[in-house]
Image (spheres, helix red, strand yellow):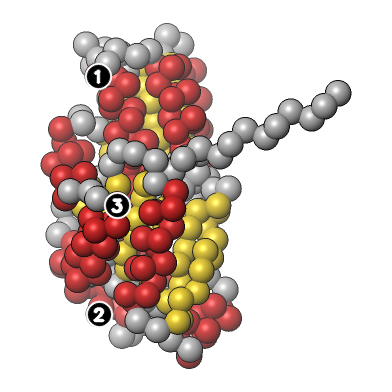
Amino acid sequence: MDPFAIVCDSSHDLPPDISEKLRLTVVPYTINFGTESSLDDGVLPLEEFAQLLDRYDKGKGYPTTAAPAPSRFAEAFMSHIKQGLSRILTVTISHKVSNTYDAAVQAAEMVEKEYPDSEIEVVDSLSGSMVEGMLVLEAARARDLGHPLHEAKRLLENMRGNLRLMVALETTKYLAKSGRARHFQYLLSNALQIRPIITARDGALALCARVRGRMERAVDRMVDEVQQTYRSGVVSVVEGMAPDLKEMVVHKLSQRLGLNREQILETKMTPALLVHVGKRVVGVVWEQEPEPEPDPQPS
């Protein structure tokens, strides 16, 4: 019996085969197309979803996303408890970009009242996409090594501060449509052909850089940052629906960091994230060198 179960939301962006091997329980977002709704549960192929996105992009009723309700997390938790796994580690997208973390915490409190012997811990990734995915991988490693729940949570909280995310967008119009970007950024990136690079800073989305010209220059800017701060281990390259951009990033990382392809985890964003960033997007997630501890002040 595993020491604990792992639950996460569907923005983790791990490839489906890895997600299955890790025995994850994934709580999906809801994607609303007008009066119609769909779960971000991997049933709808990404290619079909991208076609829907194109169709709605040209007309009215652009899709929106909704965080999982607490009841969905509670259902996932109780399913494990009824199978004999009363200890559960949950990883979510940052609380500053979604209500998902709050929903998971609320569900954990509800379930622990009903099942007093249960223990449910919730870790805020303070980011999303493959930052959450990397933390889920670490959670699974800790579980498989037999670490207790509280120790696994501590490992994830220590690791998340060293994980970096940079995502280059061809346009900010999708962020604008979904309300995730200020209007002037939308005008700036389209009028001047500026490619925004966004990151997660203190749990919130932040503009990291504006690169003028082709997307290749934005890719170079991201790879420069990885090269300067990369620590060790797996580097992840995540794309929307842009295989050319993904190949460009993988090639440059291999050249500049001396990595082989097996050391680069290639994956795609889920539909719930594509709603906000569009298809022509590519990002990098890596573990950087930890910040040096400040020198103690003389007494």
Residue 158 position within the rendered picture, expressed as x and y whole percent measured from the top left: 49, 30
Q: Nearer the viewer, residue 90 or 83?
A: 90
Q: Nearer the viewer, residue 113 or 146?
A: 146
Kind of residue at badge 1: Asp
Q: Circle 1: is it few (<14), some (14-19), or many (20+) Cα within 10 Å?
A: few
Label 3 sits on residue: 257
**112 relative to 251 in the view: left or right:** right
Where is 50 relative to 68, above or below? Answer: below
Label 1 sits on residue: 144
Instruction: Please name which of the two marks, 1 or 2, marks the residue nearer to the observer.
Output: 1
Q: Residue at x 38, y 25 (%)?
A: 89
The disc label shown at residue 55, or none: 2
First in sequence: mark 1 or mark 3?
1
First in sequence: mark 1 or mark 2?
2
Kind of residue at badge 3: Leu
Residue 3 position within the rendered picture, expressed as x and y whole percent measured from the top left: 30, 13
First in sequence: mark 3 or mark 2?
2
Q: Nearer the viewer, residue 193 or 228?
A: 228
